[in-house]
Image (spheres, helix red, strand yellow):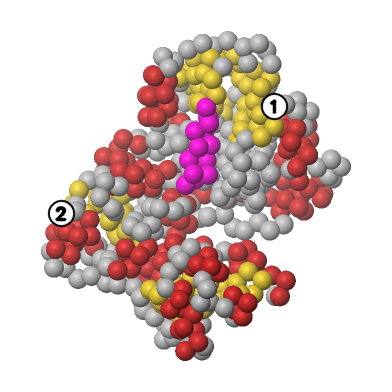
Amino acid sequence: MNVEQIYTNCLAHGAYYLESNGEAAVIDPLREVQPYIDLAAKRNAKIKYIFETHFHADFVSGHQDLAKKTGATIVYGPTKMKTGFQAMIAEDGTVFPLGHAKIKLIHTPGHTLESSCFLLIDEKGKETALFTGDTLFIGDVGRPDLAQHVIADLTEEKLAAHLYDSLRNKILPLSDDLIVYPAHGAGSACGKNLSKETSDTLGNQKKTNYALREGLSKEDFIKELLTGLTPPPGYFPKNVLMNINGYDSIDTVMERGVKGLSVKEFETLTHNNDILVLDTRRALDFARGFIPGSINIGLVGNFAVWCGTLIPDIKQKIILITDPGKESEVVSRLARVGYDYAIGYLEGGIDSWKNAGLSIDTLPTISVEQFAEEIKKHPERPILDVRKKSEYDAEHIANAINAPLDYINKSMELIDKNKTYYVHCGGGYRSMVFNSILKTKGYHNLIDVQGGFGAIKKSEKFNVTEYVCPSTML
């Protein structure tokens, strides 16, 4: 029996390839499916099933394309939802033969109503692994508030109660030596406090995962699970609908997006108010020179998640500035979260724009050492900390204003266009995203602090004792 976890860090997502005696299954595939097809071909196996643990919210699954290209059967757990493509809606307890092994569907509603886990029974008849989707993570469980954004009468309390029952009645009775393989790890917005580990034994999770705590009542479970939940990114319900209804082939999306545009063609498109100019270079490269009106969301970072959080319209037409050779990666990573309407990239990158003599804009940046001197000279200037509220609450510069990037529209309300602000995040990525977006909205007095809070704490010139305020001092 062969089990391979195929982990994608930028989405904190785990897909799985299972194979026995020439038959294979893929669990929760990503949008670009060729790697699964290539893996099966390399091993002389045929992909027989595509098991979906639920209708995913945080990415667009590759189930539809993979089924078309391989003839595999798409399988979901019990659901009343009608899919826009052929799929098998299986019952709780259904067993699927895979070579000499078996896969058993265990319906575990709670994260969503159709959420299911898949139990691997090896060639010897031993239960060896449990693929839990978003039902059970390492150190956490799936948040129960996502489905209500698609089905209005599904409250988070109702789903949390379902999840409690699923964990108690379906998961806890299973063997301690099972390996738990979840769909996500740390960094995913599908849970509150996921571990960096991407697998564990069920026995260890029974000991360490708060949601599996012995003696935990349903009422306490619901309270604990719902405390501290923040609103999910706006693209989540849109991804759910794409996963239910279907979508354009990834081949079509790539052909449309990976299209070179001349400087003249690109410049013409920048005047179209319906088109977003997205620059995916590193923050400092962007700051030194960019096309006026463009925004920066760097490819080196949680690119897809931030695009989904900050670009409101999933059907937004997008033209791209990338580092040379990164065009295909950018388009595919946009497609992973449903942004299928990239319509081309600037041939030759930013250098071709500069060489054509067209105007370039810049954003002011300063080093942490310069920042230390600046705040002594200008103590009246406010500091914006664009990290998440939880990061800010843990530790921040005294008197800094928390203006989280993930709630940028509310954060803008805190800013006076006539004042100068210093802006920092954790490492310099998010602050440049923040500043670039506000620049397009007429905020021209924002100074980016390179390296962010991490660099501030490490700097010998920055008086951490004087300026940094830990949570115990709040």
Quickly name the residue at label 1.
178
- Do the numbered discs 2 and 1 sit on residues whose CB atoms are within 8 Å? no
Please tell me how crowded label 2 is: few (under 14), some (14-19), or many (20+) other residues with Cα within 10 Å. some
Q: Earlier in the sequence, mark 2 or mark 1?
A: 1
The residue range painted magenta reads: 4-16
Q: Nearer the viewer, mark 2 or mark 1?
A: 1
Q: Position of residue 59 (x, y in %)?
A: 48, 43
Residue 344 versus residue 268 in the image, above or below: above
310 to the left or right of 320: right
* Residue 416 visible at all: no
Type of the residue with mark 1:
Leu
Q: Which SS does the magenta portion mostly show? A: strand
Quickly name the residue at label 2.
262
In front of the other: 327 or 270: 327
User: Dot 1 lies on which element?
Assistant: loop
Please tell me how crowded label 1 is: few (under 14), some (14-19), or many (20+) other residues with Cα within 10 Å. many
Residue at the image position 66 percent from the left and 71 percent from the top? 470
